[in-house]
Amino acid sequence: MIPFLSLRDVTALHGAEIQEAVARVIDGGWYLQGQENARFERHYADFVGTSECVGCANGLDALILIFRAYIEMGVLRPGDEVIVPANTYIATILAITENGLTPVMCEPSPDTLEIDAERIEALITPKTKALAIVHLYGRNAYTPRIGELCSRYGLKLIEDCAQSHGCRTADGRMTGSIGDAAGHSFYPGKNLGALGDGGAVTTSDAELASTVRALANYGSQRKYVFKYAGRNSRLDEIQAAVLDVKLKYLEADNAHRREIARYYEAHIQHPLVRLPDVLPDEQNVYHLFPILVGGERRDALRDYLAAHDIGTVCHYPIPPHHQECYAQAAWNVPRLSLPITEQLAREELSLPMGPAITREEAAQVVEVLSAFS
């Protein structure tokens, strides 16, 4: 059996240190908003290259808090438009609509699978106030064109870094430090994953960070004094301690992912399978290894691999604009036509990928895939 991702094997890579960190928190008796959080926030901000990091409960909350903070600061208002890639996990869209903002879907490039920078300008209106980019699959989504458009039109640039821990842009900057603010997820399956839910906001805007921190603490900056009607969204001390351990090994774990990915890229040759454009090493941390299966054969290949004990996942078989929760949304009436996104939803299949998969297992995946007909 070659699982899509074995969290047990991933945790075992650094198991002794993780257990020591968890025991330290348990024995210390302080479980929220303590030294572990402060240490991890400092280390992660340094790693990303920002002056501020605010831990929170999960990646969705991180994005929600960014948009909410901008509303509280008067930078955004309900009804403002946010351009966002149509090819993304629904959390990116939920964070926008949760705050009464209007998502404007932008198609991806069929070659990179990321937001198509050449399609953005045509979507900008007087109501457009922000652009959210998603470094999907662990691939850098930022381009100089995106930066130029944000500067020209005065748009806030928000990064969804849920899948891009350790990924860099072409000019060497770390994702999470490129835009005005970034949301990060530490869901267990991420490149930097906790043993439960966790998230963070990174930014070099001190006012934004302070507002996010207050909003995540019921809206309070001082005990029993509430400036905002906030929410409870905190990273607990155990998760912070675990993340601080795993952060030390993130670059090495990403290097292993690249090694496996390069093997896939060199050896997968099948008439039905197409790979996205290969990016330079630093611009892809291979959170996922997506392939595109043509001829309406994606599900057949998925089932065939499963029959040979190889785990895969389809990301994301129903795009956000086709989800029932948005069927009656004003911005989705009549239902949007986004043919590139819809094709990716039909064709995408992710192969086993992670820091614990071996070269031998990758070779077996390729061998079995090559025999598919």
Image (cartoon, rainbow, N blue to C red):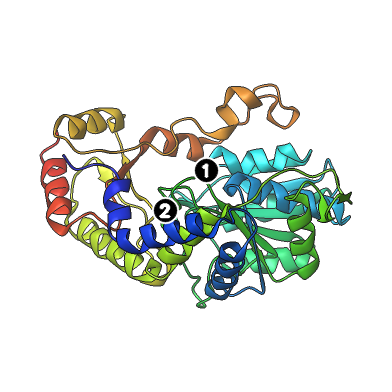
Q: Nearer the viewer, mark 2 or mark 1?
A: 1
In this figure, which residue is indicated by the disc labeled 2? 111
Spot occupied by residue 146 in the image (x, y as percentages of width and height)? 63, 63
Secondary structure type for disc 1: loop
- Is residue 183 visible in the rendered structure shown here? no
**Would residue 11 appear left or right of 40 to someone viewing this image?**
left
Q: Secondary structure at mark 2?
A: loop
Q: Residue at x 62, y 67 (%)?
A: 38
Q: Amino acid at mark 2?
A: Asp
x 62%, y 54%: residue = 32
Quarter of the figure that contains the N terminus: top left
Residue 131 image point, x, y percent? 69, 54
Q: Which residue is mark 1?
A: 87
* Label 2 vs 1, first from the N-terminus: 1
Left or right of 16 on screen, residue 319: right
In the rendered image, which quarter contains the C terminus?
top left
